[in-house]
Amino acid sequence: MEAKTRGSHAKWIALTALAPIAWGSNYPVMHHFLPADSPLWGAALRALPAGILLFLFVRKLPTGSWWWRAPLLGLINFCVFFVLVYVAAQLLPSSVAASIMAASPLVLGLLGWAMLGQRLNLPTLIGAVCGIVGVILIVGLSTARIDGWGVAASMAALLVFSIGSILTQRWRDDTPVLALTSWQLLFGGI
């Protein structure tokens, strides 16, 4: 029984590791394999196919206020965010872009406090700062020249991502998560 439990835990640990590995590969892949002058196509090619496949799986149309919320969230969470990340990846070394995005827990905490009235406590702040320092220590900082527009794009992506996350949380209801995600991907890709 104990060996079966360990095997189950190992499977979940491996699956959990896939997300950061996939996310961490975004910057080098975008920087080296996508055309530098096509951020809108890069965003569309990331969002639209996933949105179509997910929509074909869930087969549910938006209802009520989701007809305006889903396009807005799709624009924020996928279109604008992906374009800004794409631009940052073209203009910055991957380590710098990743280090800026490592501030997302801190920014989300501050916006959650400002927009949702969520309590921001000391352990959350300490954890966010430790996460930022950890990413910087792991990926290092580049010795290459840092492009100001790339930093601005990366910081804007961080802010857009955080606002989209807060709005998604604020508007959360009993709508199935997969349906909501499919609508956002479709609208963001379009």
Image (spheres, helix red, strand yellow):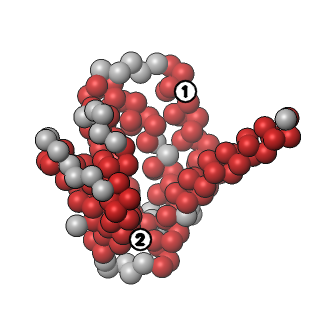
Circle 2 residues within 10 Å: few <14, some 14–19, many ≥20? many
Q: Which residue is mark 2?
A: 90
Q: Quick check: 154 left or right of 64?
A: right
Query: Quarter of the image containing the C terminus?
Result: bottom left
What residue is rendered at 45% in x and 49% in y?
101
Label 2 or label 1, whichever comes before in sequence order: 2
Residue 16 in sight here = yes
Q: Position of residue 22 (x, y in %)?
A: 55, 60
Percent position of residue 70, x then y = 22, 49
**Rendered location of residue 125, percent (x, y):** 49, 26
Give, as a three-letter code, the residue at label 2.
Gln
The image quarter containing residue 41 is: bottom left
- Residue identifier under label 1: 126
**Residue displayed at 38% across by 35% down:** 108
Q: Residue at x 30, y 56 (%)?
A: 59
Name which residue type carries label 1.
Answer: Ile
- Check the image and report above or below for 17 versus 103: below
Q: Secondary structure at mark 2?
A: helix
Identify whether 42 is placed above or below 66.
below
- 3 or 157, nearer to the observer: 3
Task: Name the residue at 56% across, 30% down.
Answer: 127
Q: Can you tell which mark lies on residue 158?
A: none
Q: Is residue 173 above or below residue 113?
A: below
Q: Left or right: 189 with respect to 28?
A: left
Residue 153 visible? The answer is: no
Q: Position of residue 104 (x, y in %)?
A: 43, 42
**Along the horizontal axis of the image, is 157 left or right of 18?**
left
